[in-house]
Image (cartoon, rainbow, N blue to C red):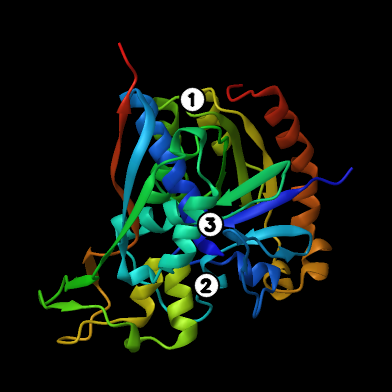
Amino acid sequence: MGRRVGLLDLDLTSPSTHLILGVDGLQPIEDKGIIPPRVHGLSYISIVLFSPEELIPLRGVDISNAIIELLAITRWEDLDYLIVDMPPGIGDEVLDIIRLMGRSFFLLVSTPSPLALETVGKLLFLLLELKAPILGVVENMATKPTSEVKRRLEELEVAYLGAIGYDPELDDALGHVDRVMRTRFMEDVGKLAGEVESRLHKGVHRQ
Amino acid sequence: MHEWALAEGVISTASRVAAEEGLEEITEIVVMVGELQQVDREALLFALEQQRTPNMMKTRFRIDPIPARMRCRVCGEEWNFKREALDNDEAEAVHFLPEIAHAFIECPNCGSPDFEVTEGRGIWLASVRGVRMAG
């Protein structure tokens, strides 16, 4: 059965979801606020809808103000899921979502690189400290079987949800959703989606 | 009409304040509207009137415009926002999301887009007056 899904790209200074979705020339619909336009079945909001080309250098307080504004004026339809895509780390976006969207569940993504694990580890510690619900961690761009990510998560009692293999063909498909959907990357994502959804319904955030 | 959503925020915040302060009737709500966002005063007033709650039946809505001022974080220059500096598409983008101004406005002295909006960014609730419940 299909789900009604919204996608909110909260990476305000370096958004990229529009490149994956092939969004071009799309504008927000104004009606008692902003109605997210539909993109390939998703209700979609990104800063690129308001300013497609320009550089928008923003500092912390500006990022917070922009997030509050977007959350206040956007009229999402009745959704099953709203996915909020955030930049890496523990910056304003994460802190604001914890502060403003109390019912959020966190799904973390890390590559097997120790550098990425270091960043994701910091976010994990923050979320654990704040008792924010964590669905688990997905390993992305996995090139070889490794237990490093899994082992580190076991220590923290956080669920390892599975791996998405490195797919060298993904970059060529970006912007063409029909091609993206046929990649090995999406095949792996599809396998994980059921697990993520079932954990969401159980409200489970620890192993 | 984007002003509807802004009015919704004002009404819900004023209702929360009234509940916290034990006001059974709200007599006046003052809203400050920064020039940067170019909110349509009449549209905002209409939206506020339409969204009155039962304890706002006699509420007077006051909307005060606040000029927008910027200060450059690099050279310290301060200046006033001028609507004429933006074309229509740019003005509309800033109307939805005031932070987009950083894409279109730069310091008149050194050209940096790294400035802060010191006054008149958006819309905020300045005061709520009312009558307290007896006892």
Q: Residue at x 74, y 72 (%)?
A: A173
Q: Is residue A1 left or right of residue A111?
A: right
The picture places residue A29, in percent across and down from the top left corner, at 64, 68
Up-down relation of residue B79 to residue A201 (above or below)? below
Q: Is the residue under label 3 in contact with that under label 2 (CB below 8 Å)?
A: no
Kindly report which numbered mark, 1 or 2, lies closer to the viewer in this rendering: 2
Quick one: quadrant of the C terminus of chain B? top left
Q: Which residue is identified by label 2?
A: A50
Task: Find the residue positioned furthest to the top.
Answer: B135
Amino acid type for the residue under numbered disc 3: Trp
User: Residues under labels 1 and 2: Cα distance?
Assistant: 40 Å
Q: Taking the image as drawn, is residue B93 in sight?
A: yes
Chain letter of disc 3 in the image: B
Q: Is residue A144 left or right of residue B17?
A: right
Q: Is residue B106 left or right of residue B54?
A: left
Amino acid type for the residue under numbered disc 2: Phe
- Same chain check for tags 2 and 3: no
Kindly report which numbered mark, 3 or 1, lies closer to the viewer in this rendering: 3
Q: Secondary structure at mark 3?
A: helix
Which numbered tag is attached to residue A156?
1
User: Residues under labels 2 and 3: Cα distance?
Assistant: 19 Å
Chain letter of disc 1 in the image: A
Q: Residue at x 16, y 86 (%)?
A: B110
The picture places residue A196, in percent across and down from the top left corner, at 71, 36
- Same chain check for tags 1 and 2: yes
Amino acid type for the residue under numbered disc 1: Leu
Task: Find the residue positioned furthest to the front.
Answer: B58
Q: Which residue is identified by label 3?
A: B4
- Same chain check for tags 3 and 1: no
Q: Residues within 10 Å of mark 3 (few under 14, many from 20)?
A: many
